[in-house]
Image (cartoon, coloured by chain):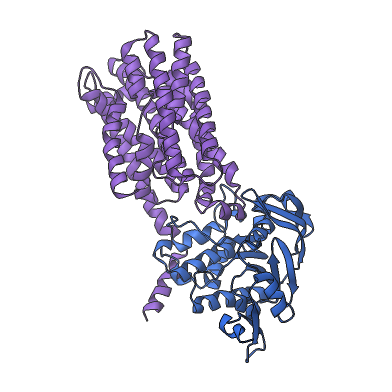
Chain colours: A blue, B purple
């Protein structure tokens, strides 16, 4: 399923954030959106997920203008997980994940076996099945994040958009979430994630889009676009790119200011 | 080992729906039994006391006997009115608490009751002979205006509970003051006025029931239809939109339905307070926060509260009666204090 932006401009909280972006995200892609705070990556994600109404241009889902499709119809194909989730929701993990079936269920329709299978699959994929009867409030940060991912998975989306799914997680859970996204991607799901951590983007994603001031600064495979000059221009910090000795993948790091003085 | 048993337990809990369903069925059964019990007492006791046998006979036979007249023409319709008033207020409160994510959500606190009440008082002062259906219609207009104001205040996600409650208190005070001024300027029967202001079912009969059913029944059905969407909305606006539920449209629909249900209650019983606040909290304790169960349960709890309060109101200072709203306030106010102290 293809998701694209055509001359997309977006406004958030009364400010023009994203300016005239055109992008094609093909089915089965694994994409990271990176950029400094305020560069518009979250706003772009919101726009792509039809959570924001464009001030210019449009978003296409499989060639159709996304706003011309019913919101429920979109939700059957596209799931989005915002970065922040309401704290006061205190339901069990199972109840939360069942709500992901809403776009597939009618008002008076009883849960079908397909619904049940989707929920079980989502719980297992996000590794929260053993937490199914626990309440959200009793979970650790990593467990809770996986429960919310399971909610999105229960929609059985073909496109999954996530806003910083690894923030607030420790290293182990970061890697677990990224591995989950990779696995879902190999099963055919298109994944688009806003990421803060450049080394995670370099290691796990197959395409990295860099944003700066609401525009696309670079876009390509990690090995080609994660370069010191490009990153420096976007993040405004001198960067050095290491190579992972095991995989050969790029590991971007900010340069040590002390070392730079000796230059 | 520990995690293994945890996983084994979890595999059954994915479909723990069945265990919950049994609990909900039990709650419903107990609720209906309680309501029936209150109903039986209502048929038996009042200005004249009837035996169980007389009360039952009065219920089934037509109005040609004395007990038939008392039960069939006075007590039974008034009991049905109590059920509709309590059910409507309970559901309105549950919806308002859900949509505003505010445990203080209540038609009285948010000013809906006062808006409907002002409309009712205006209609009565314009035409003291206005038929019951006219009052009901006026209340609907008032309730919808109140819902509109609430929507503007609560518009778009950033609903601050404090802001909503403050706006509601301000509106209640304003509308309430105008209502009292209007009622004071019209020399209506004092007990009716007092019953309206404090909330009561004095003299209400089948005509009251008939005047609100065309609004209250669709309102209750709509509330149930919206319950799934309220569940989704409780996950936050962005996640709701992502799941295909349009947040603002749902909020508007919920407020309109809450306005209609509140207006239905006000048209029959005047300004009854605290039922909308109290019922959802009791219901949540019984069935949890899933609106598909919470809304019907709030209706049942509200009906029980109002029917019981009305029975008590009739009996405490016999042969006179105090307004039923005094009883609900006496129950509700301490509960509100408890909420503020321990829960909010």
For the question of whether residue B34 can be seen, the reply is yes
Residue at position x 36%, y 44% in the image: B281
Q: Nearer the viewer, residue A207 or B230?
A: A207
Residue B269 in the image: above or below residue B4 = above
Residue A76 shown left or right of residue A123 in the figure: right
Q: Nearer the viewer, residue B177 or B8?
A: B177
Residue at position x 53%, y 29% in the image: B144
Residue B181 spot, x, y in % from top left: 39, 15
For the question of whether residue A189 can be seen, the reply is no
Q: Nearer the viewer, residue A251 or B36?
A: A251
Residue at position x 39%, y 21% in the image: B177
Residue A182 in the image: above or below residue A119 = below
The image quadrant of residue A156 is: bottom right
Q: As drawn, which residue projects farthest toward the front?
A: A262
Quarter of the image with the N terminus of chain A in it: bottom right
Q: How many marks?
A: 0
The image quadrant of residue B191 is: top left
Residue B240 spot, x, y in % from top left: 57, 52
Residue A58 shown left or right of residue B342 in the figure: right
Residue B197 spot, x, y in % from top left: 35, 21
Residue A117 spot, x, y in % from top left: 56, 66
The image quadrant of residue B323 is: top left
Residue B153 shown left or right of residue A37 in the figure: left
Residue at position x 47%, y 22% in the image: B210
Quarter of the image with the C terminus of chain A in it: bottom right
């Amino acid at each position: 399923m293809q998701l694209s932006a055509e001359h997309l401009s977006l406004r958030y909280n009364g400010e023009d954030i994203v300016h005239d972006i055109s992008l094609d995200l093909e089915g089965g892609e694994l994409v990271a959106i990176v950029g400094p705070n305020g560069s518009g990556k979250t706003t772009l994600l919101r726009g792509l997920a039809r959570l924001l109404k464009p001030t210019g241009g449009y978003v296409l889902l499989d060639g159709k203008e996304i706003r011309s499709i019913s919101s429920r119809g979109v939700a059957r194909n596209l799931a989005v997980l915002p970065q922040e989730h309401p704290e006061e929701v205190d339901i069990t993990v199972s109840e939360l994940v069942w709500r992901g079936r809403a776009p597939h269920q009618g008002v008076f329709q009883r849960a079908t076996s397909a619904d049940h299978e989707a929920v079980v699959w989502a719980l297992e994929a996000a590794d929260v099945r053993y937490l199914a009867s626990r309440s959200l409030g009793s979970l650790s940060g990593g467990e809770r994040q996986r429960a919310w991912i399971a909610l999105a998975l229960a929609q059985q989306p073909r496109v999954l958009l996530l806003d910083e799914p690894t923030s607030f997680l420790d290293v182990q859970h970061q890697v677990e979430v990224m591995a989950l996204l990779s696995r879902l991607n190999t099963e055919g799901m298109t994944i688009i994630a806003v990421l803060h951590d450049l080394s995670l983007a370099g290691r796990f994603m197959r395409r990295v889009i860099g944003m700066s001031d609401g525009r696309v600064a670079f876009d390509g495979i990690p090995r080609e676009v994660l370069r010191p000059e490009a990153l420096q221009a976007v993040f405004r910090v001198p960067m050095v790119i290491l190579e992972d000795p095991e995989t050969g993948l790029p590991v971007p790091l900010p340069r040590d200011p002390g070392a730079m003085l000796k230059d | 080992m520990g995690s293994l048993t945890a996983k084994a337990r979890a595999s059954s809990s994915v479909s723990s729906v069945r265990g919950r369903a049994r609990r909900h069925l039990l709650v419903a059964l107990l609720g209906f039994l309680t309501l029936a019990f209150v109903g039986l007492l209502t048929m038996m006791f009042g200005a004249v006391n009837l035996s169980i046998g007389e009360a039952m006979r009065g219920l089934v036979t037509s109005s040609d006997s004395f007990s038939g007249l008392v039960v069939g023409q006075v007590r039974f319709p008034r009991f049905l009115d109590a059920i509709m008033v309590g059910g409507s207020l309970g559901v309105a409160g549950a919806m308002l608490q859900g949509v505003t994510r505010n445990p203080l959500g209540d038609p009285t606190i948010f000013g809906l009751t006062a808006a409907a009440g002002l409309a009712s008082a205006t209609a009565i002062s314009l035409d003291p002979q206005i038929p019951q259906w006219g009052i009901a219609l006026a209340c609907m207009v008032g309730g919808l205006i109140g819902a509109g104001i609430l929507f503007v205040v609560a518009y778009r996600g950033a609903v601050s509970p404090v802001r909503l409650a403050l706006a509601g208190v301000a509106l209640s005070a304003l509308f309430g003051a105008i209502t009292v001024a209007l009622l004071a300027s019209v020399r209506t029967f004092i007990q009716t006025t007092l019953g309206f202001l404090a909330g009561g079912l004095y003299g209400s009969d089948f005509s009251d029931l008939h005047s609100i059913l065309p609004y209250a029944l669709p309102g209750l059905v709509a509330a149930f239809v919206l319950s799934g969407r309220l569940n989704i909305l409780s996950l936050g606006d962005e996640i709701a939109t992502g799941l295909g539920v349009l947040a603002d449209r749902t909020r508007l629909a919920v407020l309109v339905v809450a306005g209609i249900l509140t207006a239905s209650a006000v048209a029959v019983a005047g300004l009854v307070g605290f039922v909308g606040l109290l019922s959802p909290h009791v219901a949540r304790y019984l069935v949890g926060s899933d609106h598909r169960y919470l809304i019907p349960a709030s209706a049942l709890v509200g009906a029980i509260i109002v029917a019981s309060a009305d029975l008590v109101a009739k009996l405490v200072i016999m042969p006179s009666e105090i307004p039923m709203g005094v009883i609900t306030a006496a129950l509700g106010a301490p509960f509100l204090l408890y909420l503020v102290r321990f829960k909010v």
